[in-house]
Structure formats: C-alpha cells, structure tokens
C-alpha cells in the first residue's frame, strides 16, 4: 500500500509493532493561513506569508480573492504567498454579481461574507450540499445591523447574497454559540466600516481561542481591537502589509500527540509551544489528564505515552480535537466523557452522532448528549470506517489502526481539506511492510 495514494476509495492502516518515537512538523495552520489571507488582501501594500498551508480550504480562500482581482503569487510548494493588498477597495466591483464557490470551507464563506460586505459590491457565495446545511444566518443578521444588505436561503443557510455599499458601523450583537467564525469574520471586516463598530456577544461563546487568534493576526497587520466586558470595539483603521510567519497547525498536531498516547510512544511536534496562538495546543492537557507526560519546550511540545485512564472534560475551547480524543479513549481504562461541544453537530458532519456511530462499529459503547458524548471502551474489531467526507473523522479514527488490525478508512482523500499529505506523514513515523518507507 502506498500511503501517498490518498485518492483511493479505501486505505488500511498498518499496525505499529511497538511504541512510536518521532519528531514531526505538521503543515501550516489552516486557521492562521485563512486569517492572514484576509488581512493581507485588505491591507495597503504587499505582504509575504510564509509557512502557509496548501489545502482545499486555503485554496478556496486564495482562489476567491484572486477572482476578486487580488494578485497573489505562490512559491512552487505554495508555502509562501505574496499578496498585493487592495487597501479595502476591491479591483473587481460594479453592478454585476460576483459568484464565488466556497466548497465546504466554513472559514472561507464566513470570513468572506463579512469582508465583502465591508468592501461593498454584489456577491453570491455558495458551496456544496453540506455547506447549504451549515447555518450562517446569525452572521447575516449582524451585518444587516451594520448597514449591509445580506440575505441567506431560508434566512439561515447558504447561498448568501450580498448587496452592499460598505458597512456604516455602530453597534451590533452577534450570536457566538454556533461558531466563533461569525465573530472573527465581523472583527476582520470592522476596520473598513465608516464608523466605530461595537460588537456585542449573544449566547455562550464557543471556541474562544480562535477569536483571540483573530485579534492577534489583526494586530500583527496593524489593526487594534479593544476588548471589554461588553464585547469588542474596532475603530476605522487600515491594515498594513507585512511579512507574516504561520505556525504549524495545532489541530493537525493533535493526531501525532495522540499517536504517542495510543502506542505508549514519544512524539515531539516542532514549531508549537505553550504560548502558541492556537488554542488546540491545549489538547495535550487532556492527554496529560489521561496519564501521558507532557513537556513544553521553547519551540516544541513533547508527549510521552503512559497507561491511559478515562476522563471527563469540557472541550468547548478545543472542539476540533474531540474526534482525536475519542480515538485515544478507546484504549483508556474506564469511560471518557466530553461535554460543551453542541456546535460540533453543524460542522463538516454531525461530529457527535456520526462519531458515535463509528465508535460503536469499532466495538465501543457510546452514549450521546446534545452537547457531547460518553465513550466506554470495548473489545475492538476490524472496521471499515465511514468518514462522512469529514477530514477530521478520517485522520482521527485512522489512529485506532495503530493497535487494532483491520482498520480501513473510506474516502481517505477527504483529508485534502486541511492536510493532503496526512497519511504519508502518519506512516512515515513508523516502519511497516505495508507502507513504502
């Protein structure tokens, strides 16, 4: 089996013959790449982004800006992007409607909906069938409060139609209980408004570290965000071009840290540290509670596996790593309970019920709740894992195959969304007759 052939319909995971020791550097952060692309595209001058992720989600964002007239040059491996910013005035505008295809990239459609409403013009943003089931109505409602005409299908879902002369500004309230990306999109668009924007929050915020990440990237591109008990304030400002380095993806790193936990191994992920912008670095705290040893180095995070025990944990802040923890939970003593992730039901797939289905097929007992699930390990068995075209389902549940023979991943090519070379990188951490190392 060639681990590079991730476009095949099925891939079997070779069992590791013992604890895995490895040092890895995941590709660049998707979240940082797409935020940096927005800020660079709206900036005055030319920015250079290094360490960028080349994946389906980032390609969708990049292609959209290019279709809107933003000049972007990429290096041969697409890890370095040179972006000629438009200063908030798009080269492509006018009365004709610009149609943009967003695939199933939630960051792209949410960030661009806000940014294009701020730039002004007529646009329609649409995506695949699953995208048309992912809510965006609360973002549209917030943008209407700021003066833009934004309409969603049935008031809630894509396609999104924007007819805007720019944002006036003022006060608005945005729901933050389904996706932090609504708030992040509004924050990045707010400097282009004619007046100061005051953003209030309705509901309990999910994935709060991603909002902090947004504010940090904006600050690096010269825009100041004011945080208060009432929400966020952004005065009219202009983004400034700069050279910007993108750290490795912490969500992707979670698979390699979990690899250490599952095999009792020793894995160091380079390029991340205790002060990384990405909240998903805190996934290692879950592994630490389960019995692993965690070491934060100046520019790396090391995880050493140990006897695993089940835990109860609120993963609201690091919800993209729930599936990774679920894979580890199958090898723990006692149940693992995850709460606080109701918003996982409206991601690429229902990451609570669909995850539970696959864990049960592998042999676990699973109880689901509106905001999470409880996993009790059972006797594992060979399984063809359905991925629901969800990249995180494919990557996380592939880890079960490190110890359980006969784990096959259907549609492994869906990892192209955020990590095209995942299986090659996974197999490169250990040698086995079934791979090409």
Image (cartoon, helix red, strand yellow):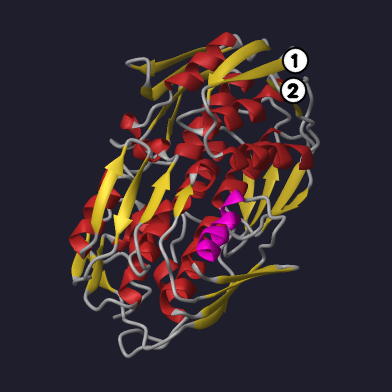
| Closest to the observer, 64 or 279 | 279
Image location (x, y in percent) of residue 81: 65, 53
| Closest to the observer, 77 or 105 | 105
Q: Is residue 312 left or right of residue 334?
A: right
Residue bearing mark 1: 196
Task: Read off the magenta span.
Answer: 279-289
| Closest to the observer, 431 or 80 | 431
Instruction: Give the main secondary structure of the magenta stretch.
Output: helix
Q: Residues within 10 Å of mark 1 (few under 14, many from 20)?
A: some
Q: What SS does tag 1 mark?
A: loop
Question: In which quadrant will I find the C terminus?
Answer: bottom left
Residue bearing mark 2: 234
Q: Is residue 381 left or right of residue 215?
A: left
Q: Residue at point 48% right, 65% down?
A: 290
| Closest to the observer, 166 or 225 | 225
Image position of 67 with respect to 202: above or below = below
Residue 285 belongs to the span the image colors magenta = yes
Question: In which quadrant will I find the N terminus?
Answer: bottom left
Q: Residues within 10 Å of mark 2 (few under 14, many from 20)?
A: many
Rendered image quadrant of residue 2: bottom left
**Residue 96 seen in render:** no
């Amino acid at each position: 089996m060639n681990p590079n052939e991730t476009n095949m319909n099925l891939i079997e995971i070779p069992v590791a013959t013992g604890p895995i020791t490895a040092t890895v550097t995941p590709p660049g952060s998707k979240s940082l790449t797409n935020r940096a692309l927005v800020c660079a595209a709206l900036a005055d001058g030319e920015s250079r982004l290094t360490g960028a992720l080349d994946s389906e989600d980032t390609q969708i964002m990049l292609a959209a800006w290019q279709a809107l007239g933003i000049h972007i040059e990429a290096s041969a491996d697409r890890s370095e992007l040179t972006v000629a910013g438009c200063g908030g005035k798009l080269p492509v505008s006018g009365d004709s409607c610009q149609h943009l295809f967003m695939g199933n990239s939630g960051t792209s459609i949410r960030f661009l909906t806000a940014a294009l409403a701020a730039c002004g013009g007529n646009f329609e943003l649409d995506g695949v069938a699953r995208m048309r089931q992912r809510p965006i109505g609360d973002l549209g409602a917030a943008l209407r409060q700021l003066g833009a005409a934004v309409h969603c299908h049935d008031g809630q879902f894509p396609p999104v139609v924007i007819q805007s002369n720019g944002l006036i500004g003022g006060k608005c309230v945005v729901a933050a209980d389904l996706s932090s990306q609504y708030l992040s999109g509004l924050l990045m668009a707010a400097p282009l408004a004619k007046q100061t924007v005051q953003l209030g929050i309705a509901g309990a915020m999910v994935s709060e570290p991603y909002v902090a990440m947004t504010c940090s990237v904006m600050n690096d591109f010269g825009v100041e965000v004011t945080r208060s008990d009432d929400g966020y304030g952004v005065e009219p400002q202009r983004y400034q071009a700069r050279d910007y380095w993108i750290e490795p993806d912490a969500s992707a790193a979670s698979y390699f840290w979990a690899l250490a936990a599952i095999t009792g191994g020793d894995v160091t992920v380079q390029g991340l540290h205790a002060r990384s912008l990405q909240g998903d670095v805190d996934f290692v705290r879950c592994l630490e509670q389960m019995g692993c040893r965690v070491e934060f180095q100046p520019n790396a995070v090391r995880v050493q596996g140990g006897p695993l025990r089940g835990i109860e944990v609120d993963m609201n802040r690091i919800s993209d790593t729930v599936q990774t923890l679920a894979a580890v939970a199958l090898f723990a003593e006692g149940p693992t309970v995850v709460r606080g992730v109701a918003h996982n039901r409206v991601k690429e797939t229902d990451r609570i019920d669909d995850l539970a289905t696959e864990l049960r097929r592998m042999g676990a007992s699973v109880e689901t709740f509106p905001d999470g699930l409880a996993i009790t390990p059972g006797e594992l068995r060979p399984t063809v894992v359905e991925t629901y075209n969800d990249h995180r389902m494919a990557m996380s549940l592939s880890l079960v195959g490190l110890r359980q023979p006969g784990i096959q991943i259907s549609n492994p090519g869906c990892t192209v969304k955020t990590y095209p070379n995942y299986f090659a990188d996974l197999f490169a951490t250990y040698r086995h007759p079934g791979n090409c190392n």
